[in-house]
Image (spheres, rainbow, N blue to C red):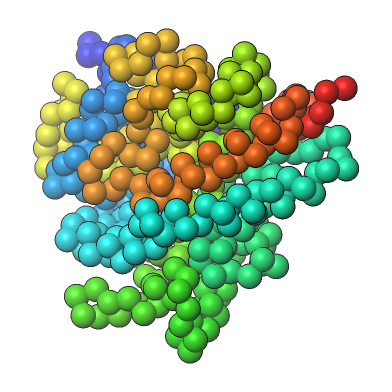
Amino acid sequence: MSETEALDLNIHDRLLWSDGPPHEEFREMRARCPVHRTDSIPEFGDEDGFWSVTRAADIREVSLDWRTYSSASGITTVSDSVIPVDLISAMFIGMDPPRHDRLKALFQRGFTPKRIGEHEDEIRSITREVLDRLAARDRCDLIADVAQPVVSRVIGSFMGIPPEDDESWANLMNSLVGFGDPDLNPKAPETVMQEEIPQIFERCSALIEARREHPTDDLTSVLVHAEVDGERLEEHEIVMGFFLLMAAGNDSTKATYTSAMLALLEHPEERQKLLEHPELIPSAVEEALRMFPAFSHFRRTATRDVVLGGQEIKEGDKVVLWYPSSNRDETVYEDPDRFDVARDPEHQAFGAGGRHFCLGAALARLELRILLEETLERFPDMALDGEPSHVVSQFANQLKKLPVRLRSA
């Protein structure tokens, strides 16, 4: 009997994800069968199974070899059950070179170090304004009252969305990315295509038309007027590019910031280190990214028969990269489940190198640093005020409620 057969585990089982990533199961997979076969996806009977890749070295090997492990056939465990592959493939995250490289280069114009640095004062101002709203309050939900409004306004300012539309865009993105969670999207997954996607296309189309008539320097205008190989982008490519930036901007920083704050509230000795030595905050950001990557997985599809981690992968097989597992790989990190603000680790929260390394990594790091700096300075005695809860999702790794008391009793 092979190791894969000996480890009877379906890592996609929703029950395993009710409180966030199933770290105990990932630990067992890394130890016994780091490349593990799941034959079926219970919620989606028409979907093929997949291979789970759980160790950092194997994930890096896959990430660096786009010729063998393609992104063009889907990027999550499920292929067509929520968002069709033809829409995913209109985003550079769902492409392979050379088109991926050409399209991603257009987006990089808006994420240069210089441009990101120019936004630091604005991001700090947005954060302080949101925290100011809590001045007369004793309690809040750190997600609804701090993280969401900050990240919505930051990405909204990049994309050219007016502030009055932030909340409606946030609701759309949360419903879409958290489609399997009964609180974020209480309807069936297929309603994403029936309701959320048409709303996104309608809203984007109006913004696109406005930028065609009146170009600005925001990223939406960049997409509208961009050319790849001498041709303008199709409208669905612009919309899906817009969606990719909005989804990442809405979820990534919000997820890691709130998980970092929960860790600091649960480990007051680590919070005290940051209060006494705020110069450690950039290191704490990296540790939070390691322990709490915003997205639990992305997927590739094998383009040929290949051996990975001792397992025979067949052409056409799905290969899923689990970042909550690789970021706690015992062969890479000492005491990997311990939150250590001084660790300053390398990690795979933004990918493991290769073509699909996260475009917005510098922006996310800047937002996280500012959010931690401002929150800790304003509310050094913050404490938990109830039970936090996680989004029930095998994809979006984030909290959905984090009730806190802002000041000591």
Q: Is residue 85 left or right of residue 102?
A: right
Q: Is residue 210 above or below residue 278?
A: below
User: Residue 236 occupies which quadrant of the picture?
Assistant: bottom left
Q: Is residue 295 left or right of residue 181?
A: left
Q: Residue at image x 60%, y 35%?
A: 372
Q: Is residue 246 left or right of residue 34?
A: right
The x, y position of residue 35, in whole percent, is 26, 24
The x, y position of residue 334, in whole percent, is 37, 11
Q: Is residue 237 above or below residue 147?
A: below
- Foreground residue among 371 and 207: 371
* Residue 292 visible within the image: no
Q: Is residue 158 above or below residue 264?
A: below
* Residue 353 visible within the image: yes
- Foreground residue among 207 and 11: 207
Q: Residue at image x 61%, y 58%?
A: 153
The x, y position of residue 128, in whole percent, is 69, 48
